[in-house]
Image: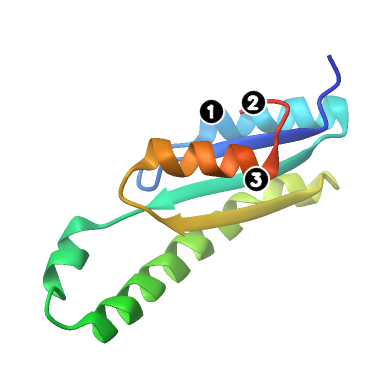
Amino acid sequence: MDIGKILVNIKHGKDSSLILEKALRLAEGSGAKVELFCCCYNVSLRNSYLLDKESLIRAEHGYMHQVEAELEKLTEPFEELDIDVDLDCCWQRHQAEAVVRKVLRFQPDIV
């Protein structure tokens, strides 16, 4: 089986070093493109701004920028080996739904 695209589902706040190492080795051996994906949602943040939708949107964007910055750091080992790597982040309460939607859009060979 040829591997052209690898989707790595990163769970925010969890140690992802093992899955990243596996993806790195797979991509290094196959030349596959890697996409790091993180579905983030913070119920406390959401509940803090129930009556102020504009502030909620700003807070969500700020939170996602923080998660993107963390993902950006995780791309460094891939870039050092000249592996094509990208990242994507979404705000979604239901992680399984977000991953399924991402798989349908990205169409990876392996998740």
Q: Residue furthest top?
A: 1
**26 left or right, relative to 56:** right
Q: Nearer the viewer, residue 111 or 106?
A: 106
Q: Is residue 71 above or below residue 60?
A: above
Q: Amino acid at mark 3?
A: Arg
Nearer to us in this view, 13 or 56: 56
- Residue at 67% across, 25% down: 110
The residue that appears at 45% across and 44% down in the rendered structure is 98
In the depicted view, which residue is nearer to us: 49 or 15? Answer: 49
Residue that mark 1 sits on: 18
Q: Which mark is residue 105?
A: 3
In contact (CB < 8 Å): disc 2 and disc 1:
yes
Q: Residue at x 55, y 47 (%)?
A: 37
Measure the C-alpha gap from mark 3 to mark 2. Answer: 23 Å
Q: Residue 18, how many percent across, how many down?
A: 53, 28
The numbered mark, 3 or 2, whose residue comes first in the sequence reads 2
What distance separates the C-alpha of mark 2 from that of mark 1? 6 Å
In the image, is residue 108 above or below residue 76?
above
Is 4 rendered above or below residue 60?
Answer: above
